[in-house]
Image (cartoon, grey):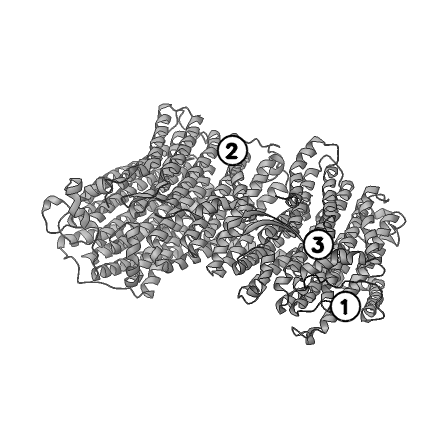
Amino acid sequence: MSLLHLVVLAPFLLAILIPFLYKKFRHIHTGWFVLGLPLVLFIYFLTFLPEISGGGAVQETVPWIPSLGIDFTVFVDGLGLLFALLITGIGTLVVLYSIYYIANKKDEPLNNFYVYLLMFMGAMLGVVLSDNLMVVYVFWETTSLASMLLIGYWFHKERSRYGAQKSMLITVFGGFSMLAGFTLLYVMTETFSIREIIAQTDVIASHELFLPAMLLILLGAFTKSAQFPFHIWLPDAMEAPTPVSAYLHSATMVKAGIYLVARMTPVFGGEPQWFWLLSGFGIFTLLWGSVSAVRQKDLKAILAFSTISQLGMIMTLLGLGSAAVHFDLANGETLYTTAILAAVFHLINHATFKGSLFMVVGIVDHETGTRDIRNLGGLMTLMPITATAALIGTFSMAGLPPFNGFLSKEMFFTGVLNATTLDLFNMQTWGLIFPVIAWIASIFTFAYCMIMFFKTFTGKHQPEKLKKQAHEAPMGMLIGPVILASLVVVFGLFPNVLSYSIIEPVMRSILPSLVSDGGEFYVNIYHWHGPNTELMMTIGVVIFGSLVYLNLKRWQEAAFFLKERDPLNWLYDNSLVWLIDGATWVNDLQLTGRLRDYMAYMFVFFAGFMAWGLFYFDAIAIDLENTAPISTYIFVLVAVLILATISIPFINHRITAIIVVGVIGFLLALLFVVFRAPDLALTQLLVETVMVVMFLLVFYHLPELKKESFKPTMKISNLAISIAVGVFASLTALSAHAFSYENPVDAISNYFIENAYTLAGGNNMVNVILVDFRGLDTLLEVLVLAIAALGIVVLVKYTAKGRENL
Amino acid sequence: MEIIMIIAVGVIFSVATYMLLTKSLLRVILGVMLLSHGAHLLFLTMSGLKQGAPPLLGEEAASYSDPLPQALILTAIVISFGVTAFLLVLAYRTYKVHQTDDLEKLRGTADE
Amino acid sequence: MSAYNANWSLMTPEIVLMILALVIFTLDFMTGMSRNKPFLGRLSILSLLATTVLVAVFNRETGQIGDMFVVDGFAMVLKIVILLGVAGVIAISMYYVDRHRDVYQGEYYSLLLFATLGAMLMVSSADLITLFVGLELLSISAYCLAGFKKYNGKSTEAAIKYVVLGGTASAFILYGMSFVYGLTGTTSLVDINEAVPTLFADYPYIMTMAIMFMIAGFGFKISVVPFHMWAPDVYEGAPTPVTSFLSVVSKIAGFGIVLRVFFVGFESVYDEWAFIFALLAAITMIVGNMIAIVQRKVKRLMAFSGVAQAGYLLVPVATMVSLDMTMSMITFYAVAYLLMTLGAFAIITLVTEDTEDDALTSFSGLYQRAPYLAIAMTIFLLSLAGLPITAGFFGKFYIFVGAIQAEMLWLAVIMIFTSIVSFFYYFGIMKQMFMRDPKPNDDQTLSVPKPVSAVVTISLVGTIGFGLLANVLTNYFNNLQWFF
């Protein structure tokens, strides 16, 4: 247990304390107790920067389940550190923001909120800092759980419950798939350690389980990072309180999928499937998200789809960059590593501008009571600080200089343009698709950014449509967005603050095979590249994007823009309906509650199986040779037995029925006598007598038998089943009889015959067996009878007070 | 002989099955009884019907019929007696509580 | 074959338990008809714990009594699981019996103890007859227990269905066994194992029938699809603690006998029957999880959840790579299953009794009424669904890895997909607990009686403990000699 382990577990430990703190200090907002932790952790992680920038890595191991190779290994390298800083840094701002956003009211379960939030924070740190895949999985599912609980925080709203369930089902589905993928990796490499798996890349690549493992792991990543078509949970997750949306659903949790893909690039990168799946799904998500965002009327919904689209963009970049693994490029070759560089850089930028935008939207919602852009407008003068932060955020997202979004957008264009020159994976023919789609998506991105800013902050103020009197937010709420917005500007103006301190180490983690010892990637980010294609594309985006925005009225009348719901929701909702319908159908089919049906299943199975076996093994055989001779006496007995049996179903009088069944029992006893089983005959006689008496006693209390009135179909099926049972049971018995004479077995019975007298001192072998050789079984049998008697006593026993009315 | 016995057992099984599939609780109980009768007879038949004297050592026969199956059948007779007796009383109890012996009406929650 | 000079001390736990059960029965008889006899419950728990200690002492060495009764690692572990399970069931029952005056306590507890005895004999028997008698001992006690609320229509109805169907299932087993005896001339599992390979070659039809009928009969006892129809009706009608007995103890003992018969008696023809179990496991997982979705009553839901769990437990039976690994997987899952199911049933008993309603909605707002129970229930449900860091997760994970190592990918895939489906209905209960307000006419806080909270706490500690420290148990299991 090292300090690092404690750091990962610290949020969980604090979470346990929170309910007590909440109860004890009811008048203090619980958020203040939480605030310190992410801040301290952030500063702690900052101290790692020098070492990690120098190319080092820190690792601490605690064995957990050594027999399966599961250790709790905390591993801090560039990639892990970047995420840890994001989680704790943005976490600090979000907690601060939430203190003002969620009021400390009487019926507000603040303790739950912070318990869930801390649970998430710890789990997320665990995901990004663990080297062991099983540990990653454990924390991964915990983030899903925390996310579900936070989405359902205001559970009185139906939409919240719906959103919570949806996110849970989709992400847990992904989680399970990912676990399966991890297990396949384990089967291939016999280790769960990511670094040991990376060391065995050659073994994996040629293994037949390679592709299934890749697909399953990608399923996990795509569901978590809301890639098409799994993105539908994210818009519904916006029912969570806005600080949660800002934290989980834009800055951190949804990037867990990105993290996973980046981590796995050394393992799977360089394979065409990986390349195509990532960049294909990514670029389509980018387009889908940006187009969908334009249709939204709710500010948070716009942000949700924008997040989806931006995640798609990062995914595309990771996919394009993975081509670099394929070539063993020399140091300094930047053609494909640029894409990775862009991915990492945009990841940081997205966290900053999207985090600030979410907080801004939260402020607007909090201060005006609505997020609907049709009701908003003209807030610039009323909320100047908020408006400034929003301006910076949206313009950066739109890819305008001098903000950081411009830089990463340019690099993104470089990345997709480079992809066209790749003479690999059929890129000669299909490569052009990437820049085209990227460019179209960027136009829509530009448009929704403009919608967000101008519809909210400019235009006519409509106080009558707002629930509250709009005014600027309190100081505490503004700190978060302002800090993030200023980071947007700082990173925009001085991008190289980041380049060697953090971006280069991250690239080193993603592409370890491309740097020789001591070498490093060349990372230099600057604004002016000269009038190249990328710049032309950006200018095109601005022009066409403005056109889209200006002609919005005309666009929005089209039916396409009137529908806000993503069409894929239809698939999700209906597949749940189908599942339930199907289950109901199976349920109604089987569980009728009728004993008759249950019996029928068993007998159909019984007869059907014997029929199948008889024909499959060709086992129908009758042996007429080795049979005992038939005496007339026995013949008459059997004939009476059969006749009596057949008559039973036709008897509608209870006493007659009992007597006939009794007759059958006595006939059986006679048969036992004939077949040299005197003990059986005696027992049967006794049992049958007692039975008849009992029947008569009980039947006295039961109603007269009624004639069975079945539907004809039911009657026929009953008849068919019973005849089939009889016929196949007989055939099987005949076959067994025939075979057993082919090859008579020397039974253990000889042992009893020889030893009955010598060992047990008895002449009646059956008795000796029962009370001596198998005395234990007989004892138990007596116990069984006793229990049946006990059961009967319970059922007929009256209470001291007589019948109770229960 | 065995063949006739097996056919008789088949008939007993058929009738027992038919009774088990009916609606009346009483008939179901009779079906259970018949089923156990059939099973005992079948077991005895399968163990061979003609080998030697009864399994009593005093009979001084060259061979005896197999004693172990007889012991098993004895066990089975007794256990099925216990179960049937319990079932009978349970039927009585069910009738007292439900005021019907029609299994169609004992369908619990299926219709809810 | 002789039992005269056998080491009967091996049977000490069973004998002691039987005596104690009789003592409890007599004590009830002697203390008259007054109803409230909490000491009987406590005494029963003490008897079970004493027997557990005896098992741990006397069953450490392997041994046998005349080929009928064997003691080995498998018997010992399962006996301890069963005994502790029944102790938990009785703790839950104490609360239940207290509220239901129409339950005769003396008979109730002694029946439970006799059923336990049957279960112990089942897992310890190496002979078809002993095994069958043990099974009947357990079954008949269970029939009686299911109908124990004799003035309650649902309870008697459940008992009727259970007896008739259970009797038919027993007949199936007997039918299968008689074929085996007819061909091998022996009832000893070890001897059968030696004889079956040639018999399979000579009489494939009879042997297949024999195996199939035994699987059908045992499958009924452990409620595997397609022999599961009785489970929901009986689970719903039976008194709730009895339901927990059926779903925990009866099922684990049933698995014990399946494993004993097939891994000792038919191990030499593994290839002939493994595929049948694979198919059963597959349809059990699919159907069990599917139907559970539409259940509106919590006990019916648990019945299907239990069906599905049985499906997971069958996977390792069908995907054996090495016997020791398979046994260790199954027993680990059995332990996990015991803990999570028993804990869940303790809470279900309390909640359904308190609200006098067994619909899923009886759980609404539990988090506000009793936060500890709600969190505990969530962990049990997560464990049942197979999410970390619970015992259920590792149990399922071992089985999953085993299935992949045995190259039964399709089974592993079904396992994953059905687990996702299962999450859907477990989530339904969680939604009720956390995302609904309590019903207006329920008490705002639910008081938790001591025995129930003890069961919940122990199960919770176990579920999380074996989740965090799974290797404690697996290390022990890996060094165990399973079959003598």
Q: Label 3's element?
A: helix
Disc 3 from disc 2: Cα separation: 43 Å
Q: Is residue C50 above or below residue C65?
A: above
Task: Identify the image quadrant of residue A317.
Answer: bottom right
The relative height of residue A97 versus residue A297 in the rendered view (above or below) is above
What is the crowding at mark 3: few (fewer than 14 residues within 10 Å), some, or many (at least 20)? many
Bin the neighbour count of mark 2 within 10 Å (Cα to Cα): few under 14, some 14-19, many 20 and up. Answer: some
Quadrant housing residue A490: bottom right
- Which badge, 1 or 3, is on the more N-terminal residue? 3
Q: Is residue A743 visible?
A: yes
- Residue A446 shows in this picture: no
Left or right of C14, for residue A122? right
Could you say where residue C352 lies in the image, as x and y percent from the top left? 53, 37
What whole-number distance in Å separates the C-alpha atoms at marks 1 and 3?
30 Å
CA gap, disc 2 and disc 1: 64 Å
Q: Nearer the viewer, residue B15 or A241?
A: A241
- Asked if residue A121 is positioned above or below residue A451 in the image, the reply reads above
The x, y position of residue C422, in whole percent, is: 54, 51
Residue displayed at 63% across by 69% down: A272
- The answer to whether marks 3 and 2 sit on the same chain is no
Residue under label 1:
A414
Secondary structure of residue under mark 2: helix
Q: Are marks 2 and 1 on the same chain?
A: no
**Mark 2 lies on residue:** C454
| Host chain of mark 1 | A
